[in-house]
Image (cartoon, rainbow, N blue to C red):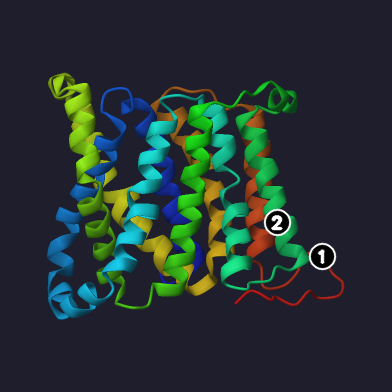
Amino acid sequence: MLKNPYVLLILAALFWGGNFALGKAVSGSIPPMTLSYIRWMEAFIFFLPFAWNELKDQKENLINNWKTFVILGLTGVLGFNICVYLSVQYTTAINASLINSFAPVVIILLSMIFLKEKLSIRQVMGIFISIIGVVWIITRGELQRLFALTFNTGDLIMLIAIILWGIYNIVLKKKGKVAPQKTVFMGSIMGGLIITWPLVIYENVDTGLSWILNLTAGHYLSLLYFGIFPTIFSFLFFNKAMLEVGPSRASIFANLIVVFAAIFGVIFLNEKLLFSHLVGGILIIFGVVLTTQSKPILKGRSIKNTNH
């Protein structure tokens, strides 16, 4: 079952949805860059025993491809997450979520430019249906809210985040096979941790360390979750599936994060499940099915899949 790339993509979205719910609960207690750094440092420590032998065998490969791992670390590993945590310090959750929902479009555009990928009409329809579903959820079915949004520094940072995520997907597609999967994953983490540690030091010098004294058992359990499920499992599952199906198809599954985040919000944050969540969830899932099906849902002339 875990060999199916679409099952892996759904699980990755599930764990990232849990990350969104818990991240919302602790984001005001831990500085954003520090939170992202701790998350990935945990992942590195937890996964190191499982990857140690492979890393020793791939030592020369790590050194020879260090630029690739630094780019992957700065974009998809730490860069994207730091920008997300920074953006919500300045903008609303509605604005950030709306901008993030357009990440698949950015990835598809970059795939068309750099990977020469082509899209079928069915895939384009599925992508836009899923985007409509995301917008429906974050506006609670009141589309006039879109016209009331204002954009600020946080919104611009979120735009940077999705651009970084798009670059990560393109680089991973082109360079992801320079080494075995574990080596690529650990090399990307090392690249991100090494390059961004000065930023974390600066953040804590600037804000102070008093936040550490205010941490509770819930915060520590949340950090444990961050370091294992959305970090290790989600990225490994997503990376493996993306190499099989390509970044354009894989990216659409990011919209499922909204669905899972809503479910976790109801369970753990006592949020209300609205009718708009159900409508949006159905649209998102239908869009995912439409985009990834090998054959058109409706009868008629078959549209050839031109994705690589």
Which of the two discs, 1 and 2, labels the residue nearer the N terminus? 2
- Horizontally, is 143 left or right of 274 in the view? right
Q: Secondary structure at mark 2?
A: helix
Q: Is residue 174 above or below residue 39?
A: below
Can residue 1 be seen in this snapshot?
Answer: no
SS state under label 1? loop
Residue extending farthest right: 300
Residue at coordinates 42% horizontally, 54% vertically from top-left?
Answer: 12
Q: Is residue 272 above or below residue 179?
A: above
On the rendered image, what quadrant is the C terminus found in? bottom right
User: Residue at coordinates 68% horizontally, 37% vertically from top-left?
Assistant: 279
Closer to viewer: mark 1 or mark 2: 2
Q: Residues within 10 Å of mark 2 (few under 14, many from 20)?
A: many
Tags 1 and 2 in contact by the CB under 8 Å rule?
Answer: no
Query: Residue under circle 2?
Result: 126
From the viewer's perspective, tell me whether residue 130 is left or right of residue 182: right
Residue 173 at x, y percent in the picture: 46, 70
Q: Nearer the viewer, residue 117 or 63?
A: 63
Residue 223 appearing in the image? yes
Q: Report which quarter residue 52 is drawn in.
A: bottom left
Q: Which mark is residue 97?
A: none
User: Residue 290: where, in percent of width, then height?
Assistant: 69, 60
Q: Is residue 257 above or below residue 300?
A: above
Closer to us: 123 or 210: 210
User: Which three-letter amino acid code belongs to the residue tagged 2?
Assistant: Gly
Residue 24 position, x and y percent, is 39, 29
Task: From the image, tell me which residue sits under label 1.
Answer: 298
Q: Name the residue located 36 percent from the left edge and 60 percent from the top edge.
A: 72
Q: Amino acid at mark 1?
A: Leu
Query: In the image, is residue 131 above or below residue 20?
Result: below
Q: Residue at x 59, y 63 (%)?
A: 248
Quarter of the image for residue 32 reads top left
